[in-house]
Image (cartoon, rainbow, N blue to C red):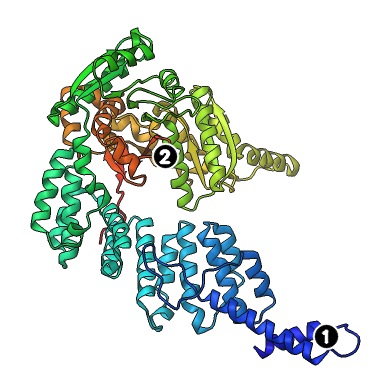
Amino acid sequence: MALINNDIQRNTLQGSPGQMNIKMLTSLRCMTLMTLLCLLAACGSQPREPGKQQRSGSAQPQTQSIEELLLTAARSPTPQADRFILQAANLALDAGDATQALDILQRITPRPVASLVRPYIIAQTRLAILLGQPQQALYWLADRRLADLPLTESEQITESRLRAEAYLLAGKYLPSARERIFFDALLDEEAQSLNHDLIFEALMSLPAPQLKIRAEAAVTSDLRGWLSLAAISKQYHTDPIQQWEALNNWKSAWSYHPAAKQLPSSLRMLAQIIRDQPQVIALLLPLQGDLGTYGRAIRDGILATHYAMHGKADIKIFDTSSMDIEQALAQAQAAGAELVIGPLSRENVNTLARNPTLPLPVLALNRSLDGLTSPNLYQFGLAPEDEINQVADHVYNEGLRNALVIYPEGDWGSRNFAAFEDRWATLGGHIVDSAQYANQRDYSDLVKTLLTVDQSERRAADVRRIIGERFEFTPRRRMDIDFVFLLASPAQARGINPTLAFYYADDIPVYATSHVYEISDSRIESIDLNGIRFCDIPWKLTQDNDIQRQVQANWPAARAQLSPFYALGVDAYQIHARLQYLKALQFEKTYGVTGILQITPDNLITRSLMWAQFSNGKVIATPTVVDAN
């Protein structure tokens, strides 16, 4: 404090004629001391766990802005300055501004004083999680300096919560749940409710067979109970009635378990889901014309699921290929429908989206053309935007930043390239170059130009001409790209992918959407696709679903080009009873054959897909679980 007062005195006296009045200087010192003490008290406050009551005698809430804190830090010596900087960094982290938080944390002394070690490590951990760097977050939490410091209950909760978030971000679902189970008993009732939702969400990300195995091997009863609850919930997640019966059996066996006393939100809503199931469902699908093939596949998927699940609702079918969509909706309402599944065409979905007062809930099987929404309209479908966004997010999370994009001429290619360009820019990635291609047999010129191999060859030719001698020469490709994003059909990709490898880009990863994979392609046909990584629906990559196996056994087309539409029908039926539940619990997921499904505030149902890679002509699905230990 003496250093601060001396600094203030020097700044005040410098350049002033004569001597300062002693009383004025004393008053100034007192005011400065009081201000600094207030600021230091505020700096000591920590963000509290949701639902955790603030202890009496704790510091006052923060009232200063980031700019004011940094200005105060600039006028203060170490370690006081580090305290203000840390407080500013936490404000930036609270606001979700990773860039600003990173800049602020870089201003702190490399080895802060002992009292600031824990807050500094916690801030760095929060930053790593915000940046999507779970391994870096776990590295900070493993810092040996933390082990040497005394640990309060609040600090224990904070560290365990951050560790759970890092594990979840890394796809380590069981460790994430275990961390939350560990500190669950330390929370109050409100915080426990949220914690139970997060435990359940993490465990539901594991496959049902693995949940059963882990439950049998669990050491503690708390973990075993949670795993058993998740196992029966995952097994019957598509059938609310069976799930309800299994839940009641579990509660009888585990009446003392914390989850039985405070069920996860999604399970608390099961009774309402069953009670609100529609008794009459109308299918508004095109059964003739250009979309008839797809409409019939969706219809068969819906009906097969209905009978497999012993559905009690009366299903009425209306052919939208022969009537206006508003007329079809009116007929469905007159027939007593409580829910509509369909329409399929984007134009018809757009028509319904313009109506802000639809008479009954509509589960459309496409997205509107202009992003229009309506309160009673749920937009579900095989939207390519979901895939584009997932490719961009996945590649960015792998640390790749510089993209080379190859896409076909025409509306489909241009629209999907624009979607990727927009998402990639939002994430902070860079498109180094891009090119369109037509349906052609030879892609050599296209690839050589994109990889600048042609420039390398021209430079070699110039050198030969100048020196007048021949010499051995290997052309070089450009070195400023991290990956290739290829929008292509299987036939197109079979021409482009080997050409990339031939022109020295065999070490650059190639990513694509589901458009690159046809489930009916033979191994010989897929050899030239080796190395391509793509996202796709679980229906095409796994055989884990009983209804899927039944549908594929009865309709061979469900294992060919129409497979996504059969899958769409299956999922449309399976989620129809859970629409209100998904809407009420914005972060809740359901696990379908078209992906992991969630609903946005605008009633758009989004899909998280699986990842796979071509290897030796075969498609190898990538496990979604990184580490279940």
Mark 2 touching mark 1, by CB under 8 A? no
- Residue 514 shown left or right of residue 109 in the figure: left
Q: Percent from the top left, x then y, of residue 177?
A: 28, 60
Under tag 1, what secondary structure?
helix
Q: Residue at x 30, y 15 (%)?
A: 293
Of 480 and 116, nearer the camera is 116
Which quadrant does the N terminus fall into? Answer: bottom right
Is 258 on the left or on the right of 326, as rendered? Answer: left
Instruction: Look at the image and tell me whether residue 616 can be seen.
Output: no
> Does residue 13 sit above or below 67 in this rendering?
below
- Amino acid at pointer 1: Leu
Amino acid under disc 2: Pro
Which disc is residue 13 wearing?
Answer: 1
Labelled disc at residue 273: none
- Circle 1 Cα neighbour tier, 10 Å, few/some/many (<14 / 14–19 / ≥20): few
Precedes in sequence: disc 2 or disc 1? 1
Say if residue 320 shows up in the picture: yes
| Residue toward you, 254 or 481 | 254
User: What residue is shown with label 2?
Assistant: 601
Residue at horizontal 73 percent and vertical 86 percent from the top:
27
Q: Judge whether 325 appears above or below 158 on screen.
A: above
> Residue 554 location in percent, x, y?
16, 23
- The residues tagged by marks 2 and 1 sit, at their Cα atoms, a distance apart of 60 Å
Q: Is residue 49 above or below residue 55?
A: above
Q: Image check: 571 left or right of 34?
A: left
Report which quarter residue 5 is drawn in.
Answer: bottom right
Q: Quadrant of the C terminus?
A: bottom left
User: Residue at 31% of width from left, 10% of height from top?
Assistant: 288
Nearer to the camera, 375 or 562: 375
